[in-house]
Image: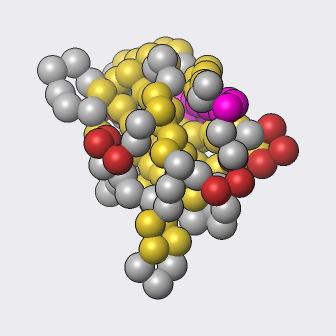
Amino acid sequence: QVQLVESGGGSVQAGGSLRLSCAASGLTYSSVCMGWFRQAPGKEREGVATLYTGRGSTYYADSVKGRFTISQEYAKNTVYLQMNSLKPEDTAMYYCAAVRRVWYDGSYYCESGVSEYNYWGQGTQVTVSS
């Protein structure tokens, strides 16, 4: 049984930082795509960042490039999302997700579409005030 457990959300002022954690269990962590997604009230869930655990290759949405960093602690089957220079528009419920596959187009990468992922955590709230 796959379990993804997020932690680290909270409330910060604009310009602040938070680090989200996602501990994965029940899957072969060495070769999966892990992703962070977010959903703001009244908006669709969107991909924020992805990481292929086998190579560490990453993807970022344009809206967070240069501010967010996805990383992993392989020995702990844990993925992190370091969020710096937070903006009020980053306010959302953040979800960790996983899928037992990777894509290849000359190099390994992970898709960022919500429908591509079939394992989801319960979510953690991030609120950024101006």
Q: Nearer the viewer, residue 67 or 107?
A: 107
Q: Nearer the viewer, residue 96 or 8?
A: 96
Residue 84 position, x and y percent, is 53, 41
- Is residue 67 visible in the rendered image? The answer is no
Residue stretch in magenta: 16-26
Residue 127 position, x and y percent, is 41, 18
Q: Is residue 126 left or right of residue 4?
A: left
Q: In this view, does 122 lie to the left or right of 115?
A: right
Residue 25 position, x and y percent, is 69, 31
Residue at 20% across / 31% down in the picture? 44
Decide whether residue 67 is among the magenta residues: no
Decide whether residue 20 is among the magenta residues: yes
Picture layout, residue 42 above or below residue 90: above
Residue at 65% across / 50% down in the picture? 71
Q: In which quarter of the image is the N terminus?
A: top right
Q: Which of 54 and 9 is in front in this view?
A: 54
Residue at 80% across / 38% down in the picture? 76
- Is residue 122 visible in the rendered image? The answer is yes
Please identify the dominant SS of the magenta region. Answer: strand
